[in-house]
Amino acid sequence: MSRLSEPLGTTVTSHLTSGVEAAIVIRSFGLGHPMVQPIPGGIIAIGSRCHLREDAPELNAEVYDTNGQLLRAGCFGDGIELARATQTGNVWVGYSDEGVYGNYGWGGTGRSRNTGKYVEPLGHAGAVLWSASTFEKLWEATEIVDDVYAATLLGEDLWATTYVDFPIRHLSTHSERAFPTSDSGPRAIITDGSRAATFGQYGDPFTFRVWTLQDDPERPPVSTGRLSVPGLGGQTKPRMMGFSDELNVFVGSSWFKLSLGDLTP
């Protein structure tokens, strides 16, 4: 589902550890599977799915002001796994394999009905930096990225873990680097630029590993362990999101935080 059958009213809230900081009421909202990020002057809401129909893609990126008024809309493509907005108002978007290789009429799943031509998915590079002002691509990855599993921002740069070998990738508009790891399916990452911690592995959502950012593929993690989250059953996957060098863990209405410094001496 890329859009709701009928638009609904919704409220977007921003939170500090002390409570709700702000609330934006949107009276008519239709994106399916949305993710929301703050940008200067308001928010950007992004739907994870996007059909290509009759050569015209659905618009799945919407910018709202602080009064909940829709200012503009654009298209970021299909198969969006995650989005992280920078303080300058640009948006890093990481794509799943469907966004890279095509679905919903993009790529190999369909051809333009009017021209019969192949339409390359907008997320074919796997990771793209978009402008929230013009909805134009500002940069895209040149190294192979099949699927972005987790990401965090450090300044204006994106740090991510990607399928298939799960290196830690540092992406910026002027360079990109990949640091090898022995990870397998991490779902969150935090970094200070010289070290990084990854959280979760296939079959074990609670484990963590701390890495020094080096090119040596044989290096072991400098620290390993398991998260202990109050109120979370051992069989329940925690909801985790990294921001810079800080991990946020959500359990119901509870919000837990830890920093990279908490995991290393």
Image (cartoon, rainbow, N blue to C red):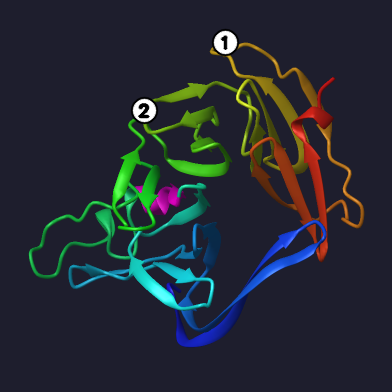
Q: Which mark is residue 199?
A: none
Residue topped by disc 2: 174
The residue mark sitting in front, 1 or 2, is 2
Query: Badge 2: few (under 14), some or many (20 or more) residues near its Cα, within 10 Å?
Result: few
Looking at this view, name the residue that lies furthest to the right: 230
Q: Which residues are magenta?
A: 89-100
Q: Which residue is drawn at the image coordinates 54% and 63% (left, top)?
A: 35
Q: Relative to the observer, which residue lies in front, 111 or 172?
A: 172
Q: Is residue 182 left or right of residue 55?
A: right
Tell me the element at label 2. loop
Q: Is residue 185 left or right of residue 99?
A: right
Vertical comparison of 4 with 252: above or below:
below
Residue topped by disc 1: 216
* Quarter-of-image position of residue 220: top right
Percent position (x, y) of residue 236? 80, 56
Vertical comparison of 157 with 113: above or below:
above
Q: Which residue is drawn at the image coordinates 34% and 39% (left, top)?
A: 140
* Quarter-of-image position of residue 72: bottom left
Tell me the element at label 1. loop
Q: How far is the residue under mark 1 from the one under mark 2?
A: 23 Å
Q: Amino acid at mark 1?
A: Asp
Percent position (x, y) of residue 92? 45, 47
